[in-house]
Amino acid sequence: MNVPRHRALTAGAAAVSAALSIVIGVRLSGYGVPAVLLLACCLSCMATFSGLFFRVIGAWSTTVHRCTRPGCDFRVSLTHTDSAENRRWQEIAAQHPHRTH
């Protein structure tokens, strides 16, 4: 995933989490919740939604290469790499020396 697309997803995630927080705040205001508590609740919801979205975006933009040998736990996690670097690490994962115990 290239960097401008990642930034667009990050900005979109922040906007969605802000919108969800506002919706929750509007719903709570109908119950007569004090403004300070309403603000605290909205900020807490925004932090929670933002954290969730950023974790999903991070997982979506990460590539993991593992060794194909059964029982081998070698793996490499890559984020924001070009196709040549991705291919290089894929070959390294496939050809790394295996430890025998």
Image (tube, helix red, strand yellow):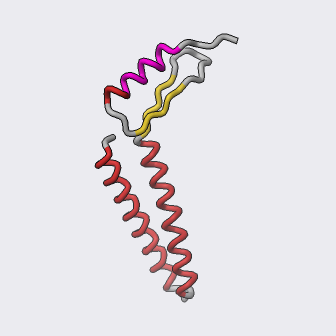
Q: In which quarter of the image is the C terminus?
A: top right
Which residue occupies the foreground of this view, 13 or 84? Answer: 84
Magenta stretch contains residue 93: yes
Residue 22 screen position, x and y as percent: 43, 74
Residue furthest out toward the left: 4
Splitting the image into 4 quarters, where does residue 26 fall? bottom left
Q: In which quarter of the image is the N terminus?
A: top left
Q: In the displayed structure, does residue 92 sit left or right of residue 6? A: right
Residue at horizontal 35 percent and vertical 59 percent from the top:
11
Secondary structure mainly formed by the magenta segment: helix
Vertical placement of residue 70 versus 36, above or below:
above
Q: In the displayed structure, does residue 37 sit left or right of residue 78? A: right
Residues rendered magenta in the picture: 86-96
Residue at horizontal 37 percent and vertical 28 percent from the top:
86
Residue 10 screen position, x and y as percent: 38, 55
Vertical placement of residue 73 versus 53, above or below:
above
Splitting the image into 4 quarters, where does residue 12 fall? bottom left
Residue furthest out toward the right: 101
Magenta stretch contains residue 46: no
Which residue occupies the foreground of this view, 70 or 8? Answer: 8
Vertical placement of residue 4 versus 48, above or below:
above
Residue 39 screen position, x and y as percent: 52, 79
Residue 78 screen position, x and y as percent: 44, 34
Splitting the image into 4 quarters, where does residue 16 fall? bottom left
Residue at horizontal 47 percent and vertical 26 percent from the top:
65
Residue at horizontal 55 percent and vertical 84 percent from the top:
36
Total labels drawn: 0
